[in-house]
Amino acid sequence: MKFTLKIWRQKNAKAQGHFETYKVDGISPDTSFLEMMDILNEQLVNEQIDPVNFDKGCKGKHSGPVSFDHDCREGICGACSLYINGRAHGPESGVTTCQLYMRKFKDGSTITIEPWRSSGFPIIKDLVVDRKAYDKILQAGGFISVNTGGVPDANAIPIKKEDADESMDAAACIGCGACAATCKNGSAMLFVAARVSSLALLPQGKIEGKRRAKAMVDTMDALGFGSCTNTRACEMECPKGITVAHIARLNREFLRAKLSE
């Protein structure tokens, strides 16, 4: 298979970015998307491209290997945050970019690859964005700090199965940022809701529930993420299938916190 790749290139956070076009050929349908990017970078390195052209801002000139984020390549870490042909993580639903395979694209097609587009995720270089904002939101309240004693037996604290299952579904969030990148408002509500909901459903998390919801929402707002207007685009593009039902729970938890002030 062969493809034309239109890739966003940006030297650093302050530089003006632009698209550059590359050609790749001989790609197996069973090649993952990130493996295809590796092949492209090997091609660019082997061509011994002069990086001076990029420093001079010469558009259309190849500018060295493409920087992109990745880690586990197993759909666990959420680092492979790419916007592909106008969709977070690409055209297939329920997968991260590293789980996307080239057989999902038509042979000879053009693929446009961009970084996350959200004010909360500033571009560092090329396709790499700064996702520390999510870490700051978690630090604001996505944890349990009360003393719960020693490790109890698994069945020592009765929890309804439906609550346990829903908590685990929310905890499946990998914090990739697809929700904020997809939302027309750049809202991180689905991420925050998943973190709040996973704890709010468990007895260990109820103790700090009010403080947690308010602190995380306030931090999200302070970091420049937009407001939720219930378009459900976040739910559509979430690779782990997190539903907006968790946003409803977050709103209830936040309202309780405000009323108790």
Image (spheres, grey):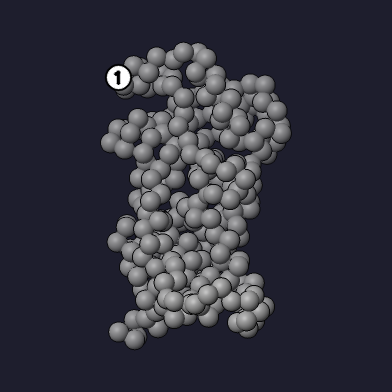
Along the viewing direction, whichever of 71 and 45 lies nearer the viewer: 71
Q: Amino acid at mark 1?
A: Lys
Q: Tag count in the figure?
A: 1
Compared across the picture, whether 171 is left or right of 127 comes to right
Q: Residue at x 53, y 75 (%)?
A: 150
Residue 86 place in picture, x, y as percent? 52, 44
Residue plotted at (48% across, 31% down)? 7
Tell me what residue is drawn at x 46 percent, y 24 percent.
Answer: 65
Q: Residues within 10 Å of mark 1 (few under 14, many from 20)?
A: few
Q: Nearer the viewer, residue 117 or 132?
A: 132
Image quadrant in which you'd find residue 214? bottom left
Residue 54, percent from left and from top: 35, 21
Q: Which residue is mark 1?
A: 56
**Can you give x and y, in whole percent of width and height, for residue 1 in the image?**
68, 26
Residue at image coords 53%, 41% = 71
Q: Is residue 246 left or right of residue 30?
A: left
Q: Residue farthest to the bottom?
A: 260
Q: Quadrant of the C terminus?
A: bottom left
Can the viewer see residue 249?
Answer: no
Residue 68 in view of the camera? yes
Helix, strand or loop status at disc 1 = loop
Instruction: Looking at the picture, tell me which residue is in the foreground, 212 or 233.
Output: 212
Residue occupying the far front of the picture: 150
Query: x%, y% of residue 187?
Result: 41, 60
Residue 171 horizontal side relative to residue 27, left or right? left
